[in-house]
Image (cartoon, helix red, strand yellow):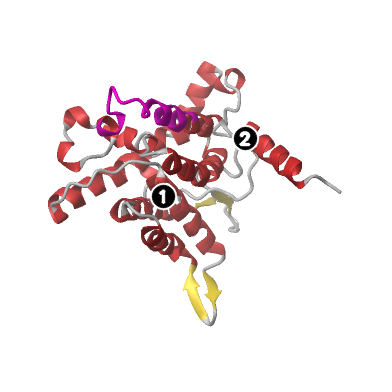
Amino acid sequence: MPNVQSFSTLRARSYVFRLPLFTRLMVLAIVVLWLAGIQSAWDLRKWGALIPDEMNFFTAYRMNTFPLIHLNFFHALLNLLALTPLLERFESEYGTLTSAAMFFGPLTTIPAVAYVILERVILRVNTPVMGASMWVFLLLSVEAMRTYKTNPYFVVGTVHVPTWTTPLLMVLVTAALIPSTSFLGHLCGVGTGYLFGLGYLKFIAPPEKILRWIEGKLNLLGRLPHYVSVDQKTYGRFGVLPSSSSGGGSNLTGLVGSTQRLGP
């Protein structure tokens, strides 16, 4: 009889070894920063959290550090388990350079800025947030919009529920079951994910021509293990699908890639 435990361990090990480069680096950064936060000589969480009242030109780094810092071991573990497969799928479709540029750029700063504005200007409160859950809900929203294009509804009893609402339902469930979660922060992530999935953020993505030049100039594919090239995807980075018209053109579907992956 097969050893189920051994089989599961082998599958998990194989999956970890196949993770692309940017995903590996983000997992490593979260683990290292969690370990760094154990010491009491320096308050890492206060330094790196997104605190609305402390945001200014000199503390703008918080918009990139807060997703990597967590409250405790279980906070970090839950976010890692949720984030890793979603980020791995994103990187495998859009490439390592694109993932790094987007997640240390607009896909983090847009929800962060939205959260700070809502907290300071509208709600007039100052609730610090940290953790990768904003990334998780952002990526879930991207997946939900992708699924909605092919499967608009799922049935619960006799009710047809739109597929795109799944991340919103998960935000509500998370807020109800897990204490101290940021409902507003998760909503900011969901909103940004919807914009990304609908293609409204394609203008802020780095130009593919420049990415190819950087990859070729530095020979990143040959030098970096587990690196995903911008060309290791089906039908291009922005989901350019074959056209059915006689003109031989192509249709842009926005920032929604193919479901077939040719990368690692």
Q: Main secondary structure of the magenta part?
A: helix
Nearer to the camera, 110 or 46? 46
Residue that sits furthest to the bottom in the current view:
158
- Asked whether residue 253 is in view, the answer is no
128 above or below 180?
above
Residue visible at 53% across and 76% down? 156
Q: Earlier in the sequence, mark 1 or mark 2?
A: 2
Nearer to the camera, 75 or 118? 75
- Magenta-colored stretch includes residue 97: no
Residue that sits furthest to the front in the current view:
40
Q: Nearer the viewer, mark 1 or mark 2?
A: 2
Nearer to the camera, 177 or 11? 177
Left or right: where does residue 7 sit relative to residue 248? right
State the image quarter where residue 165 is shown: bottom left
Residue denoted by label 2:
16
175 above or below 9?
below
Residue 145 pos. (x, y %): 47, 58
Residue 76 pos. (x, y %): 44, 40
Q: Residues within 10 Å of mark 2 (few under 14, many from 20)?
A: few
Residue 161 pos. (x, y %): 48, 73
- Asked whether residue 86 is in view, the answer is yes
Give the magenta-colored segment's residue range: 28-46
Q: Which three-letter amino acid code belongs to the residue tagged 2? A: Val
Nearer to the camera, 121 or 173? 173
Left or right: where does residue 27 sit relative to residue 67? right
Residue denoted by label 1:
138
150 above or below 86?
below
